[in-house]
Image (cartoon, helix red, strand yellow):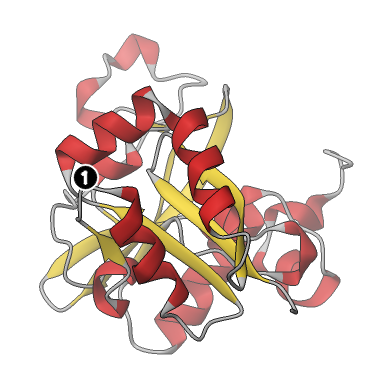
Amino acid sequence: TDPNDPMIYSAYGALVGGRALCEGYSRAMQLLLLQSGIPCTTVTGVANGEGHMWNLVQLGSNWYNLDATWNDTTGGFVSYEYFNLTDADMALDHTFSKDFSEIAPDKLSGASFNISRPSCTATEYNYFVKRGFTYSAENADALISYITSSPDEVLEVRFVNQTFKQQFAANSNAYLQDINIKLANQAYYIGRYSISTHTLRLYKVQK
């Protein structure tokens, strides 16, 4: 919370001091992945109307967006909503800074920019794709069956069917109310729904 604290912009602040802004998160992630032999860099942009930093990670021959800051949530639960996303998915609520080559020399002073940012179009190592938590059915009843079959204490489900995403986004309140009613006798309840990333987060409750 203190912008004059140099530690919050560093990997040291995140990993040792326990306090960091997005730059500290991103530099810590970069350090850990590079030490693990995984190519990783940082990328800048804007999110929630503020300057932001996250990572680009290379897995195999493809690159992915990874936002460790936005994956960190309250309550001790780590979200995977921003774990290995395409540029298109990331652009739903993140804006990339321009590449260095796209900015006129007289405009560079004080500008936030990226240098030769690789494009991210693959989905193979997206968390939801890898775990099989991408939902493509087009009705809420099938979604209920899908949710209640999971053994996880906290479950995130991402919609991938474009038609259903549009239907859900347009009528999200009605859908969420209906789903919660149908989950009343089950083990889960909806804790959050993100319209921008089309992700449901559900928590298992003790019966």
Above or below: residue 178 compared with residue 38? above
Numbered label tally:
1
| Residue extending furthest toward the left | 61
For residue 113, say whether it is visible: yes
Q: Is residue 37 left or right of residue 53?
A: left
- Looking at the rendering, in which quadrant would you find the N terminus? top right
The residue drawn where x is 13% and y is 52% is 121
Above or below: residue 109 compared with residue 173? above
Quadrant in the rendering for residue 127: bottom left
| Residue extending furthest toward the top | 106
Tell me residue 32's x, y (percent).
51, 80
Q: Is residue 36 left or right of residue 99?
A: right
- Looking at the rendering, in which quadrant would you find the C terminus? bottom right
Residue at disc 1, secondary structure: loop
Q: Is residue 138 left or right of residue 45?
A: left
| 175 or 134: nearer the viewer | 175
Question: What's under tag 1, amino acid-wise?
Answer: Ser
For residue 126, say whether it is visible: no
| 63 or 173: nearer the viewer | 173
The residue drawn where x is 43% and y is 79% is 33
Tell me residue 52's x, y (percent).
54, 38
Q: Badge 1 is on which residue?
A: 116
The residue drawn where x is 77% and y is 54% is 8
The residue drawn where x is 80% and y is 58% is 7
Above or below: residue 206 compared with residue 5? below
Quadrant in the rendering for residue 28: bottom right
Tell me residue 128's x, y (percent).
32, 67
Density class for disc 1 (Cα within 10 Å; few <14, some 14-19, many ≥20) is few
